[in-house]
Image (tube, rainbow, N blue to C red):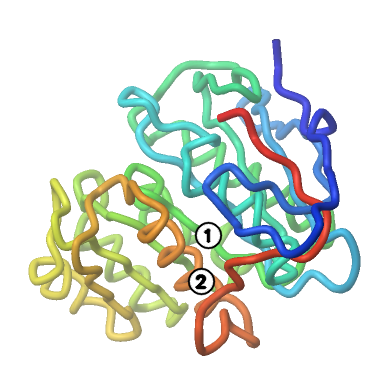
Amino acid sequence: MTFDPASYEFRQGPGPTPIRASTVLPAKRELVKLDTEDGHTLVAELALPESGPVNATLITLHPLPTHGGFMDSHVYRKASYRLPALAGIAVLRFNTRGTASPHGTSSGAFDEGVGERHDMEAAVRFAVERGLPNRWLVGWSFGTELALMYGAVEPVASQVEGAVLLSPPLHRAKDKDLLQWAASGKPLAVLVPEHDDFLKPAEAAERFSLVPQARVVGVDGAKHLWVGEKYAARVLNEIVDEVSEAGSGAAGLPQEWDGPVATASA
């Protein structure tokens, strides 16, 4: 059974509620379908601020689906739970071809990052057609490869402001892709865990030196999957600082919410 975001039950507590891993803040959430140019239909969810302007739009690209990555991977869930309310940021999540998650299964089969180019293009096209402003790619692990390989070339390059990369392995993406980003001049924020399994901060700084505008941030204590509220919150703060003029604030995003909240089951 496909998860329905309308099933969240929001309740007003007696006072401010601490924001935990499973805390869901109010937003306008809808299940959507993305149609690729090569004939696939992708499962997706769009979370928008309940009111006020959309300050930025995140087009999220999930980790490797053959190793458990999907649109519901925890950092992206938490982005959709929190950022529409806390920062006025729209969050578009989707399963690439052949990927299944609690939100459903996209058609097709995993294509080693080749056919997935069409998936990313479909997501960007959807955001453009919906009139969502200030669009940014946010890739995590395998998703960083898609952003690097296809985000600085058309038809995507002219439709996005830049990208935020979480735990880039630089496995499929090569130096030529980094040089494409360098030539584009578009901002690139690169968050690298201290204990990453594939690319640690010092090596990342060296590899990304090909992109003069890249901002490489090593995160002490973190691992590839950003497990733990401390690290997930750090990622969200860094994303908001990169994509939003207002940023996350001197103390980071609020850690309490004085309003109705729901609790996610997972």
Q: Is residue 262 left or right of residue 72?
A: right
Across and down, in percent, residue 203 comes to: 9, 67
Question: Mark 1 highlights which residue?
Answer: 137
Q: Is residue 39 left or right of residue 238?
A: right
Count the marks.
2
Q: Quadrant of residue 91?
A: bottom right
Across and down, in percent, residue 180 comes to: 35, 68
Q: Compared with residue 135, is residue 122 higher up or lower down, i.e. above or below?
A: above
N-term-proximal mark, 1 vs 2:
1
Across and down, in percent, residue 58 comes to: 61, 59
Which label sits on residue 153? none
Question: Mark 2 highlights which residue?
Answer: 162
User: Around disc 1, counting alpha carbons within 10 Å, would you say few (fewer than 14), some (14 to 19), or many (20 or more)?
Assistant: many
Q: Nearer the viewer, residue 55 or 170?
A: 55
Single out the residue that lies furthest toward the top: 1
The residue tagged with tag 1: helix, strand or loop? strand
Give me the C-alpha separation between circle 1 and circle 2.
6 Å
Q: Is residue 52 left or right of residue 159?
A: right
Q: Are marks 1 and 2 in contact (CB under 8 Å)?
A: yes
Across and down, in percent, residue 177 comes to: 30, 60
Q: Compared with residue 161, is residue 193 higher up or lower down, i.e. above or below?
A: above
Q: Nearer the viewer, residue 203 or 261?
A: 261
Amino acid, disc 1: Leu
Query: Which residue is at 67% across, 63% downward?
Result: 57
Amino acid, disc 2: Gly
The residue tagged with tag 2: helix, strand or loop? strand
